[in-house]
Image (tube, rainbow, N blue to C red):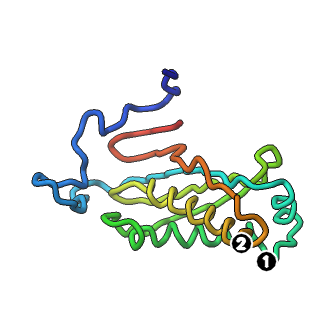
Amino acid sequence: MAPKPANTRPSKAASHALTHIGASGEARMVDVSAKPATERLAVAEGRVVMAKATLDLIVSGNAKKGDVLGTARIAGIMAAKRTSELIPLCHPLALSKVVVEIEPDAKLPGCVVRASVKVTGPTGVEMEALTAVSVACLTIYDMIKAVERGVRIEGIHLIEKLGGKSGHYRV
């Protein structure tokens, strides 16, 4: 078994019951009304893996549907803002910052998608960051699927979380 990365806290699941499950097993939205509003940040990442020729098409700006990276960036930002409409039991949040970065990577070949989301509020923004990455990756796929159907979306995960009671988490 691999050693735990530095700066990583143990999973809350190891010591606490699932917060979205009530006493009789029903799904429920967590009451955050008594929690203080603090600054919170979450960063997530994922990859879209494709053939080198497809990546070259994206980088050159010659994809039939237009600006793949710009469109995916906007889609990711929009998705972060609408996470509570997509994921049951997520709180609607007034996000203060959403940044979606997409870097072409010739070694994959493909694109690395990273989203940073910030809020001052009583609950974290992990789901917003993960949703932004997911939708940005899906948008890249949508815009290039006519050229290559075998594109893979991989490795979507939380990289970092700051703020709140559980403190700092970093992979």
The disc, 1 or 2, on the residue closer to the chain's N-terminal end is 1
- How far apart marks 1 and 2 lie (CA) works out to 8 Å
Q: Quadrant of residue 94?
A: bottom left
Q: Amino acid at mark 2?
A: Met
Residue at left offset 52%, top offset 70%: 79
Which percent across, then down, holds residue 57?
Answer: 86, 65
Q: Which residue is mark 2?
A: 143
Circle nearer the viewer, 1 or 2:
2
Q: Which residue is mark 1?
A: 66
For the view shown, which residue lies furthest in the bottom direction? 65
Q: Give neighbour class at mark 1: few <14, some 14-19, many 20+ (Cα, 10 Å).
A: few
Q: Quadrant of residue 78?
A: bottom right
**1 and 2 marks in contact (CB < 8 Å):** yes
Taking depth in this image into account, of 84 and 2 the one nearest to the observer is 2
Residue at left offset 70%, top offset 58%: 151
Q: In the shown orientation, is residue 125 left or right of residue 29?
A: right
Which percent across, then down, holds residue 129?
Answer: 51, 57
Say what secondary structure mark 1 lies in.
Answer: loop
- Label tally: 2
Residue at left offset 66%, top offset 51%: 47
Q: Amino acid at mark 1?
A: Gly
For the view shown, which residue lies furthest in the left direction? 24
- Position above or below: 164 against 142: above
Say what secondary structure mark 2 lies in.
Answer: helix
Q: In the shown orientation, is residue 150 left or right of residue 16?
A: right
Residue at left offset 52%, top offset 43%: 160
Query: Residue 25: which numbered mark, if any?
Result: none
